[in-house]
């Protein structure tokens, strides 16, 4: 009788325990997402990645760059959000002159340091994130080339090691109309033929074509050429035909109506229709939850319908908040509050509900405008005592430093599964 009872108990245990073990194993594997599918844009949630920060002694030989105007001080800093650097080796960081956090030195990082970029991509893997659109400013190309394109090489190595994906996103801000097409073509050929970026198994493709984005054409100011729509169309066609690429156009927010931030010339309609993917820039175009809802009704849903009618893809841009007081002192601190993540979450909910199949989050590391999604100082006491700093407790309450990476992970899961996001944001303490 005893043996029979033991066998029965073991059978019951097997029926309960083994499926539970399998469930836990699958859940762990799904969360880890060992290798991102780099063959398609469908379902992708991508970050913009600036990678433009430099510090003395990092090997780039430019000193402090994008952190401050000259040497850092409370009066010269040009960033608002202070990063959480607790996981980095102090040897990979640079001390901020004259600044401290309590009794300890305060530090900043350089994107030129491979260990820094690797850690960023390790975070992407840990939270199940897809990868990045690497920002490549036309005005910075000579400097990047002089530095051996160290940051881009760091990104390629990190994407390959962590199984994330990446693609180039050119930013034409400040370019000259008469030279920009030549610069774009020569640089793309250099990236493909000399750096072999598209030969990387982690370079993002769509329908067999390497993805490339060009941001800024169509804006209604002189710093974003060309004004000539024929020249703009020629750039798009060159990438699509000669380069054989899938072209993402970073457009004005009001591209469809050609109002407000967009060039009003009706000829731009043909330019936008030529793009494979339309990616309107929305940072700062709304600033509260009511604005998010209006944007969905007035812009997002009609934009999706317009692109679908022309056989195009549509990539909405969402952002966690905005603050650039140190860069522009006349602007208020915490200009567009993050609302402890609710502002970002509602935008993602709207994008999925409207039918978006992909998404860009601005940005992964943009601390200058306070849109960074990576780990940030959770409390004001975790940032330098000196100067003005934005930390995650700015809107009250306690948030972990990785809160926005967690939210991005939940958003990415929904886009992968093509399912709606719940209106209720996850609890911070889970």
Image (cartoon, rainbow, N blue to C red):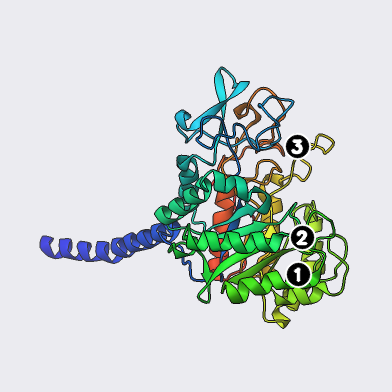
The 10 Å Cα crowd at callout 3, few under 14, some 14 to 19, many 20 or more, is some
Q: Is residue 123 above or below residue 98?
A: below
Name the residue tied to disc 3. 327
Image location of residue 93, percent across then percent down: 51, 31
> Where 318 sits versus 311, above or below?
above
Query: What residue sits right under mark 1 in the picture?
Result: 231
Question: Which residue is at 67% across, 77% downward?
Answer: 312
Tell me the element at label 1: helix
Marks 1 and 3 sit apart, C-alpha to C-alpha, by: 33 Å
- Residue at position x 71%, y 36% from top? 394
Cβ–Cβ below 8 Å for labels 3 and 2?
A: no
**Could you give the CA–CA distance between mark 3 and mark 2, rounded to whole angstroms?**
27 Å
Mark 2 and 1 residues: CB-CB less than 8 Å, in contact?
yes
Q: Which residue is mark 2?
A: 177
Q: Residues within 10 Å of mark 2 (few under 14, many from 20)?
A: some
What numbered label is drawn on residue 142? Answer: none
């Amino acid at each position: 009788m005893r043996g029979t009872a033991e066998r029965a108990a073991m059978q019951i245990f097997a029926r309960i325990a083994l499926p539970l073990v399998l469930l836990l194993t699958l859940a762990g594997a799904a969360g880890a997402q060992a290798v991102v599918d780099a063959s398609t844009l469908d379902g992708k949630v991508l970050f913009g990645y600036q990678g433009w920060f430099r510090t003395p002694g990092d090997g780039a030989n430019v000193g402090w760059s994008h952190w401050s105007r000259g040497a850092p001080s409370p009066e010269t800093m040009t960033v608002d959000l202070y990063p959480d650097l607790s996981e980095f080796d102090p040897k990979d960081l640079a001390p901020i002159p004259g600044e401290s956090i309590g009794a300890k030195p305060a530090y900043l990082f350089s994107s030129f340091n491979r260990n820094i970029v690797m850690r960023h991509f390790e975070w992407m893997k840990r939270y199940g994130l897809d990868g990045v659109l690497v920002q490549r400013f036309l005005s910075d190309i000579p400097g990047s080339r002089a530095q051996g394109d160290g940051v881009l090489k760091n990104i390629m190595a990190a994407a390959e090691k962590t199984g994330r994906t990446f693609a180039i996103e050119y930013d034409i801000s400040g370019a000259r109309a008469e030279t920009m097409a030549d610069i774009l073509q020569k640089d793309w050929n250099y990236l493909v033929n000399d750096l072999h970026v598209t030969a990387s198994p982690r370079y993002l493709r769509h329908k067999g074509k390497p993805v490339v984005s060009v941001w800024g054409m169509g804006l209604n100011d002189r710093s974003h050429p060309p004004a000539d729509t024929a020249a703009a169309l020629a750039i798009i066609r060159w990438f699509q035909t000669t380069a054989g690429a899938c072209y993402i156009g970073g457009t004005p927010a009001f591209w469809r109506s050609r109002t407000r931030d967009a060039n009003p010339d009706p000829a731009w309609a043909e330019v936008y229709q030529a793009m494979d993917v339309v990616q309107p820039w929305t940072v700062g175009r709304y600033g509260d939850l009511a604005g998010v809802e209006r944007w969905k009704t007035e812009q997002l849903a009609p934009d999706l319908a317009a692109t679908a009618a022309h056989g195009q893809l549509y990539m909405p841009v969402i952002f966690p908040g905005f603050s650039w007081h140190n860069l522009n002192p006349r602007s208020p601190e915490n200009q567009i509050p993050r609302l402890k993540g609710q502002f970002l979450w509602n935008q993602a909910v709207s994008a999925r509900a409207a039918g978006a199949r992909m998404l860009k989050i601005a940005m992964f590391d943009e601390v200058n405008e306070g849109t960074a999604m990576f780990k940030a100082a959770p409390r004001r006491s975790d940032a330098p005592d000196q100067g003005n700093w934005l930390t995650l407790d700015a809107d009250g309450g306690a948030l972990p430093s990785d809160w926005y990476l967690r939210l991005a992970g939940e958003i990415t899961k929904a886009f992968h599964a093509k399912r709606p996001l719940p209106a209720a944001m996850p609890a911070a303490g889970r």
